[in-house]
Image (cartoon, rainbow, N blue to C red):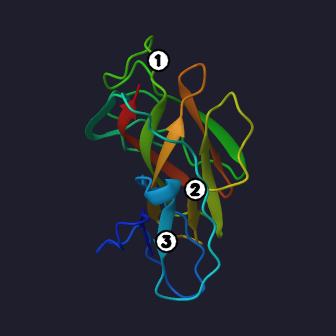
Amino acid sequence: MAAYPCGEGPLQSSILNYAAGQTIANGATIAIGAGGTVCVFTQRAMDLVIDATGYHVDGASPTTFEPKRFFETRPGETTFDGQQQRVGCLEPQQVTTIQIAGRAGIPASTPVVVVVVNVASVMPIGPGFVRLFPCHKPQPGTSNLNHQDLQTIANNATIQLSEARTVCVYNHRQMDLIPEVTGYTR
């Protein structure tokens, strides 16, 4: 599947790859095209859900960096700064708070608005999903990552920070979880 600004024609690269019968999520940043629209191209018939989770405004100041692991459940594995590591496998239907601001050079006091997160579920017990959301808001009804039993899979998401400069993660099934932040926008 490809998504692109309407009026510019389909891109040569995809933003989502899938197999027959698979439910899968993906995050992407797409420019707005003619008439304020985004166009979608698929090669096969499918049911498709598109959720807009935010937008960038003129003058926004994005900052990117090499991926930094902010949270790690697995024994023997570490985070970039030694915080929130080796916490153990997450239980089903658990909500976990991850401190973002004040780490990896992300300002703690200036208005960081969103972070770009690559989140991986590792060996989940059963098919399910993962949701990322600002901790001060209710959980959304959408997922950022869908997985099968024992499947290790990752996805990218752009998530608003909470008022406390944190991100919450809900995991539907028992799993190890690895979120890595790759940038932020003020």
Is residue 130 in view from this perspective?
yes
Q: Residue at x 43, y 44 (%)?
A: 117
Q: How far is mark 3 from mark 1, CA to CA?
A: 33 Å
Q: Is residue 121 left or right of residue 137?
A: left
Residue at the far top: name it: 109
Q: Amino acid at mark 1?
A: Pro
Above or below, 15 against 143 in this view is below
Q: Which residue is mark 3?
A: 40
Q: How far is mark 2 from mark 1, CA to CA?
A: 32 Å
Q: How many numbered discs sit on the rendered protein?
A: 3
Q: How far is mark 3 from mark 2, CA to CA?
A: 33 Å
Helix, strand or loop at label 1? It is loop
Above or below, 45 against 120 in this view is below
Q: Position of residue 7 (x, y in %)?
A: 40, 66
Helix, strand or loop at label 3? It is strand
Disc marking residue 111? 1
Q: Position of residue 97 (x, y in %)?
A: 60, 32
Q: Is residue 109 left or right of residue 165?
A: left
Specify few, some or many for label 3: CA neighbours under 10 Å numbering under 14, 14-19, or 20 or more: some
Q: Which residue is mark 2?
A: 175
